[in-house]
């Protein structure tokens, strides 16, 4: 389904509570938390910054949910351990984080790289013998699912594409050092993930996605030129019973481009309501 969006105005600033910390598998994980109610966990993308990706929507989501947004393992200000960042290692850390904070039964949402991680979690959890913390709902947001990157294209740090030339993103660029201060320092983690994990290698594939039976939302920006919407349509077609929502005029980070629509859709999905 498609839904119109015009809410990328500049009146929603980036607001987050103070960072907290927890030990997961012997490593320090920093995270943001606010609100009460059904738990909603947000996994950031390759920006490496929960603050940057979720700051415009955190307070709005916290009106109805216990919202928790970790800095995923390896991304400052979480610890950057010298480990192999395989898919299973990342999933174990995410599962351990959910368990450490009592977040079993949450809605788990991820954007871009985080969307791939959520899809991988859902696929692995659906496999026989999986030992991951229970998740009741998954939201894949512009996730790098099914994307294949040529091996010779990732020999150096990932190169971001220029952001859209809009008033919103022109304002963001002026504040980027403030909003994402650890960007360059997180390049080694990005490279380690690309080298050791299934990210960019086409997994979870159609067969793995087809085993997912947990309610799943696939949310995409129609104007996403980093992970085009065709990947979202393919993921939704592969996941039985999933809901696909495409936002016209929205790019790769819906939580920034369309915060109010993002909050409405995600909260409706988490509550099991029809998405209008």
Image (spheres, grey):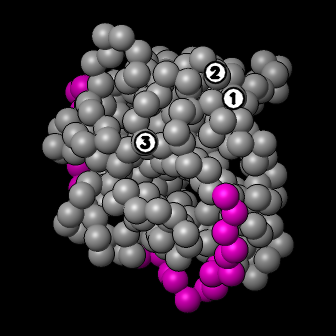
Instruction: Identify the element where label 3 is drawn.
Output: loop
Q: Which residues are magenta?
A: 1-28
Residue 231 versus residue 151 in the image, above or below: below
Name the front one of labels 1 and 3.
3
Q: Are the residues at dot 1 and dot 3 in contact (C-beta closer than 8 Å)?
A: no
Callout count: 3
Does the magenta segment cover residue 15? yes
Instruction: Identify the element where label 1 is drawn.
Output: loop
Gap between marks 1 and 2 measured at Cα: 6 Å
| Left or right of 124, for residue 39 | left
Sequence-wise, the earlier of marks 2 and 3 is 2
Residue 189 in percent (x, y) is at: 54, 33
Main secondary structure of the magenta stretch: loop
Residue bearing the label numbered 3: 215
Picture quadrant of residue 259: bottom right
Residue bearing the label numbered 2: 205
Residue 72 visible at all? yes
Sequence-wise, the earlier of marks 1 and 3 is 1
| Left or right of 6, for residue 270 | left
- Residue drawn at (71%, 42%), measured in percent from left and top? 233
Q: Nearer the viewer, residue 228 or 4?
A: 4
- For the C terminus, the image quarter is bottom right
Residue 100 in percent (x, y) is at: 18, 38
Residue bearing the label numbered 1: 146
Residue 198 in percent (x, y) is at: 60, 20
Residue 147 versus residue 138 in the image, above or below: above
The numbered dot on residue 54 is: none
Q: Residues within 10 Å of mark 3 (few under 14, many from 20)?
A: many
Q: Are the residues at dot 1 and dot 2 in contact (C-beta closer than 8 Å)?
A: yes
- Residue drawn at (40%, 22%), measured in percent from left and top? 126
């Amino acid at each position: 389904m498609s839904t119109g969006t015009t809410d990328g105005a500049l009146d929603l600033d980036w607001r987050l509570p103070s960072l907290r910390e927890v030990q997961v598998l012997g490593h320090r994980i920093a995270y943001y938390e606010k609100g009460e109610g059904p738990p909603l966990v947000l996994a950031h993308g390759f920006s490496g910054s929960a603050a940057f990706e979720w700051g415009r929507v955190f307070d709005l989501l916290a009106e109805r949910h216990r919202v928790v947004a970790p800095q995923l393992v390896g991304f400052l200000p979480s610890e950057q351990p010298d480990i192999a960042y395989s898919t299973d290692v990342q999933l174990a850390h995410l599962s351990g984080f959910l368990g450490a904070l009592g977040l079993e039964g949450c809605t788990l949402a991820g954007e871009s790289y985080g969307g791939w991680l959520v899809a991988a979690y859902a696929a692995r959890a659906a496999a026989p013998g999986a030992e991951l913390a229970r998740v009741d709902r998954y939201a894949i947001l512009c996730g790098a699912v099914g994307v294949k990157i040529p091996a010779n294209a990732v020999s150096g740090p990932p190169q971001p594409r220029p952001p859209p030339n809009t008033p919103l993103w022109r304002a963001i660029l002026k504040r980027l050092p403030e909003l994402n201060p650890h960007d360059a320092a997180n390049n080694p983690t990005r490279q380690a993930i690309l080298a050791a994990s299934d990210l960019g290698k086409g997994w979870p594939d159609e067969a793995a996605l087809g085993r997912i039976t947990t309610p799943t939302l696939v949310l995409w920006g129609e104007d996403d030129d980093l992970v085009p919407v065709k990947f979202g349509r393919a993921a939704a077609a592969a996941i039985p019973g999933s809901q696909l929502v495409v936002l016209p005029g929205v790019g790769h980070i819906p939580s920034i481009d369309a915060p109010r629509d993002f909050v409405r859709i995600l909260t409706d999905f988490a509550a099991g309501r029809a998405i209008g």
